[in-house]
C-alpha cells in the first residue's frame, strides 16, 4: 500500500456578517498579508500537502485579487449555506484524487496564527490512530450558562469545566471516514459546529491533541490587532 497523502480543506466561505465589515474577514489584512494567506502558511512550511481546496462563497468577488499572496496552490469550490455544507462540498471535490486511507486536514480561514510545530504535533499524534483528531485546549476559565433577559445575559448556572476542551482547527481525519460522516450528518439534518462533531455522530471518538492557545479564531474586528501581535511574536521566535 502506498503512503497516505494529506489533503487540505479550508472553510473560507464566510461573508462576515457578524464581523461587521463589507470585506470578509478572511481577506482582511494582517501585517501586509490577507488573513487567508496567514492561515495557509503553516501548511506551506510543512511542505507535505498533496492539494488544497478552498470553499468560498459563490458570490465572492475578492478571492481573484489575492491569489499571488497565497503560499500554496489552491483550487476552489462553492461554499454552502453554513460551514458544514462548505466543508462537505470541498471534501466531495476530492473524489477520484483522495484515497480512502488518505488524510484530510480541515482548517478555518479565520485562524491565521497556526504554528507549524502544532501542526507537526497533530500529525504525529494522530498518525497511528484510525480515527484522527483535532487541536484543542483545556478549558481553564469558569463557564457560565446564560439566558437572554430583555437583551442582557443573566447567569442560569455555572458549568463544571472538568474534562472540557475548546476545539480548534486543524482537524484531521481519514477521507474514507470523514466523507460518509459529513454526508450522514447532512442526511439527518444535523447542523454541526465542526468535523469532529460529525465523526462523533457517526460513532467515532476523535483524539484531542493539546495545542497552543494563541491559535486564535478571529471573530471580531478587535481580534485583528491581537492576531497581528501574535504573528509578530512568531517572527521573533
Image (spheres, grey):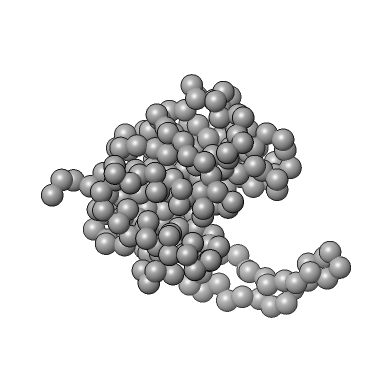
Instruction: Name which residue lies at 70% across and 48% down.
Output: 18
From where the camera sits, is residue 29 visible? no
Q: Which residue lies furthest to the left in this view?
A: 1
Q: Residue furthest right?
A: 150
> In the drawing, does residue 34 fall left or right of residue 184?
right
Q: Nearer the viewer, residue 184 or 141?
A: 184
**Vertically, is 28 above or below 55?**
above
**Vertically, is 68 above or below 50?**
above
From where the camera sits, is residue 142 visible? yes
**Vertically, is 209 above or below 158?**
above
Q: Nearer the viewer, residue 95 or 113?
A: 95
> In the drawing, does residue 133 fall left or right of residue 63?
left
Image spot of residue 30 (x, y percent)? 60, 31
Image spot of residue 99 (x, y percent)? 25, 48
Image quadrant occupied by the C terminus? top left
**Vertically, is 165 above or below 173?**
below
Instruction: Name which residue lies at 46% across and 48% down.
Output: 89
> In the drawing, does residue 73 fall left or right of residue 97?
right
Q: In which quarter of the image is residue 153?
A: bottom right
Q: Which of 103 and 81 is in front in this view?
A: 81
Instruction: Name which residue lies at 50% across and 25% down.
Output: 67
Image spot of residue 175 (x, y percent)? 32, 53
Instruction: Name which residue lies at 40% across and 29% down.
Output: 73
Image spot of residue 45 (x, y percent)? 36, 33
Amino acid at each position: 500500500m502506498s503512503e497516505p497523502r494529506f489533503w487540505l480543506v479550508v472553510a473560507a466561505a464566510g461573508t462576515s456578517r457578524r464581523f461587521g465589515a463589507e470585506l470578509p474577514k478572511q481577506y482582511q489584512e494582517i501585517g501586509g498579508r490577507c488573513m487567508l494567506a496567514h492561515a495557509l502558511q503553516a501548511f506551506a512550511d510543512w511542505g507535505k500537502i498533496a492539494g488544497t481546496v478552498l470553499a468560498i462563497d459563490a458570490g465572492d468577488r475578492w478571492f481573484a485579487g489575492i491569489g499571488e499572496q497565497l503560499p500554496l496552490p489552491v483550487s476552489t469550490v462553492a461554499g454552502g449555506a453554513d460551514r458544514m455544507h462548505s466543508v462537505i462540498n470541498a471534501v466531495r471535490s476530492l473524489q477520484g484524487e483522495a484515497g480512502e486511507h488518505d488524510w484530510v486536514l480541515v482548517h478555518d480561514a479565520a485562524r491565521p496564527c497556526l504554528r507549524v510545530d502544532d501542526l507537526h504535533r497533530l500529525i504525529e499524534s494522530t498518525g497511528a490512530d484510525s480515527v484522527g483528531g483535532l487541536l484543542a485546549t483545556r478549558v481553564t476559565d469558569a463557564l457560565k450558562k446564560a439566558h437572554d433577559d430583555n437583551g442582557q445575559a443573566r447567569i442560569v448556572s455555572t458549568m463544571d469545566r472538568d474534562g472540557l476542551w475548546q476545539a480548534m482547527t486543524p482537524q484531521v481525519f481519514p477521507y474514507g471516514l470523514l466523507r460518509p460522516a459529513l454526508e450522514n450528518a447532512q442526511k439527518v439534518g444535523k447542523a454541526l459546529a465542526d468535523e469532529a462533531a460529525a465523526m462523533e455522530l457517526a460513532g467515532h471518538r476523535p483524539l484531542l491533541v493539546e495545542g497552543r492557545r494563541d491559535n486564535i479564531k478571529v471573530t471580531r474586528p478587535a481580534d485583528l490587532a491581537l492576531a497581528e501581535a501574535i504573528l509578530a511574536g512568531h517572527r521573533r521566535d
